[in-house]
Image: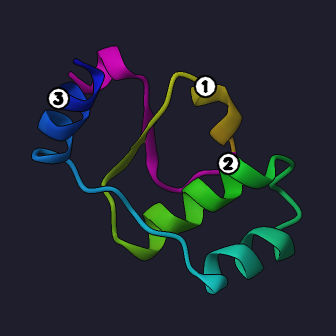
């Protein structure tokens, strides 16, 4: 059931990939305190994503991209 839901979701959204540039940008940005959040942010930025969807919106205080929780997204 979970795989079917993920498959359906992937048909409607873009999942950004990480690159070595994302890693280096995350490491060099002093505003970012959580490495994983930084990777998500720079992956989204490099792919020209319109928003980041997360339940931890407050963790992306540094983001220049709109950050939404799931409810607000839908």
Q: Is residue 22 above or below residue 62?
A: below
Q: Is residue 24 above or below residue 35?
A: below
* Badge 1 element: loop
* Badge 3 element: helix
Q: Is residue 72 above or below residue 18?
A: above
Question: Could you tell me residue 22's position as x and y percent?
Answer: 63, 75
Question: Could you tell me residue 17's position as x and y percent?
Answer: 44, 68
Kindly identify which residue carries mark 2: 37
Kindly identify which residue carries mark 1: 56
Could you tell me if the residues under marks 1 and 3 are in contact, i.e. CB atoms within 8 Å? no
Residue depicted at 79% across the width and 54% down the height: 35
Could you tell me if the residues under marks 1 and 2 are in contact, i.e. CB atoms within 8 Å? yes
Residue depicted at 36% across the width and 47% down the height: 51
Residue depicted at 66% across the width and 27% down the height: 58
Measured in 3D between alpha carbons, the distance from the residue under mark 1 to the one under mark 2, in whole angstroms, is: 10 Å
Question: Could you tell me residue 69's position as x and y percent?
Answer: 42, 23
Query: Which of the two residues, 28 or 14, is positioned nearer the viewer here?
Result: 14
Kindly identify which residue carries mark 3: 4
The range drawn in magenta is 62-74
Q: Nearer the viewer, mark 1 or mark 3?
A: 3
Measured in 3D between alpha carbons, the distance from the residue under mark 2 to the one under mark 3, in whole angstroms, is: 26 Å
Could you tell me if the residues under marks 2 and 3 are in contact, i.e. CB atoms within 8 Å? no
Q: Is residue 24 above or below residue 63?
A: below
Mark 2 vs mark 3: which is more N-terminal?
3
* Badge 2 element: helix
Q: Which quarter of the rendering shows the N terminus?
A: top left
**Residue lying furthest bottom in this view?**
21
């Amino acid at each position: 059931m979970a795989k079917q839901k993920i498959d359906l979701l992937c048909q409607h959204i873009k999942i950004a990939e990480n690159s070595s540039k994302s890693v280096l940008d995350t490491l060099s940005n002093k505003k970012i305190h959580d490495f994983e959040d930084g990777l998500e942010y720079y992956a989204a930025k490099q792919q020209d994503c319109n928003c980041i969807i997360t339940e931890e919106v407050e963790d992306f205080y540094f983001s220049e991209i709109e950050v939404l929780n799931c409810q607000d997204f839908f």
